[in-house]
Image (cartoon, rainbow, N blue to C red):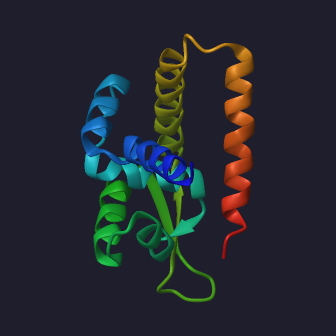
Amino acid sequence: MDNQLIESLVSIVSFFNRTDRDQAFIKQAGVDLEAVSFQLFVTIGRMQPTNVSDLANLLGKSHSSVSRQIDKLEQKQLVTTKDGEQDARVRSIILSESGEELKKVLDQTRVEMIDSALKDWSGDEKRALLDNLDHLAKTLKEIK
């Protein structure tokens, strides 16, 4: 059962990490965002305020690669950055006003996709899934 649990978790994570799915999702949402910037943008939206080091660690990318992508998102006016109060080398990153608007479009598209995928699930099944995912998320946060 443990191996099946891990296989299911890897399958779920893989679903959300595939760039081909990201490209299809971006197209369905009708937004102007490169697939390479998509995961970074979504992660910033969920973690803000954040910084380059935390993003690089979470996404498994180099600090310089993430920093370059942040610069591109900033040029598109989707994020804003400011130097850290304690250390000017640490940039604090948040979504800009237009970034927040884009996040709303992406969130709505994601909800529509999940609703479509779970259309045959009962309300009780959806609630049970949510309860179990919340429980799992809380449990995993406790692991050091």
The C terminus is located in which quarter?
bottom right
Furthest toward the bottom, the residue is 87
Q: Residue at x 56, y 89 (%)?
A: 87
46 lies above or below 30: below
Q: Is 71 or 115 nearer to us in this picture?
A: 115
**In this view of the protein, can residue 70 be seen by the observer?**
yes
* Residue occupying image coordinates x 34% and y 71%: 67
In the picture provided, is 122 more to the left or to the right than 74? right
Residue found 37% across the figure and 63% down from its top: 70
Tell me where residue 133 appears, x and y as whole percent.
Answer: 67, 42
From where the camera sits, is residue 34 visible?
no
Classify residue 123 as left or right of residue 41: right
Q: Nearer the viewer, residue 102 or 53?
A: 53
Q: Is residue 133 left or right of residue 75?
A: right
> Is 86 left, or right, of 127 in this rendering?
left
Q: Quadrant of residue 84?
A: bottom right
On screen, residue 142 above or below 19: below
Horizontal and vertical percent position of residue 105: 48, 29
Figure disc tally: 0
Asked if residue 50 is positioned above or below residue 119 in the image, the reply reads below
Instruction: Please name the residue shown 49% across and 29% down the image.
Output: 110
Q: Position of residue 10 (x, y in %)?
A: 44, 50
